[in-house]
Image: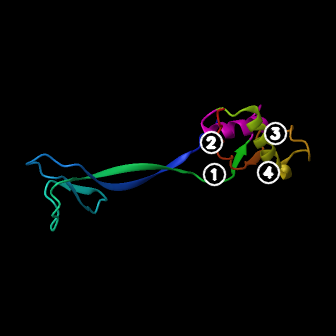
Amino acid sequence: MRAGASCIGVVALVSTTVGRHSAGAAPAHVGPVNGDGHARASDAPPAGDTETNATDVALIVSIPHPVVRLPTSWTVEPGESFWSIAADSLADAWQRAPTDLEVANFWADVVAANEDRLVVPGEPDLLWPGQVLVVPAPPALPHHSVG
């Protein structure tokens, strides 16, 4: 199988207020962002802050963001076929083994994308080691419903 990225994380800074703090405990505050991109935490409230009954908490949230996959080139190795290339591409993209039906559907897309690269026109069973093919972007991972 060939490795491929499946998602890129998007980081968001979320600020929320959490309950009352115990008497005598100073609220924690996240100060302005430093030049290095990190926020400063201090026990003293920022100037002008009159809120004394709650604690401000900063949370870092990672939100997955799907990667847009572009067609890639594939150099055929001995023993490979359009079927194995389709199956490996789906397994890499989905991080699971695809079903035969899923491979069959994507196999048709891979063959169609390479019609002009076939050694014998109309004969997708003949590939040569070293032949360079294009593999279209795999479809999104299907959601199977149980029931």
Q: Which element type, helix, strand or loop, lies under badge 2?
A: helix
**Marks 3 and 1, Cα distance to the nearest angstrom?**
26 Å
Labels 2 and 4 touching (C-beta < 8 A): no
Residue 133 visible in the current orientation: yes
Crowd class of label 3 (few under 14; some 14 to 19; many from 20; radius 10 Å): some
Q: Residue 105: x and y, percent?
A: 78, 41
Residue that carries the numbered disc 3 in the rendered image: 128
Labels 2 and 1 touching (C-beta < 8 A): yes
Q: Quadrant of the C terminus?
A: top right
Query: Mark 1 or mark 4, which has the lower sequence index?
Result: 1
Q: Does 1 appear above or below 28?
A: above
Dot 4 amino acid type: Ala
Dot 3 amino acid type: Trp
Query: Is 120 on the left or on the right of 9, as rendered?
Result: right
Residue that carries the numbered disc 1 in the rendered image: 69
Q: Which element type, helix, strand or loop, lies under badge 1?
A: loop
Query: Mark 2 or mark 4, which has the lower sequence index?
Result: 2
Dot 2 amino acid type: Ala
Magenta stretch: give its range. 76-96
Residue that carries the numbered disc 2 in the rendered image: 93
In the displayed orientation, state which residue is furthest to the bottom: 48
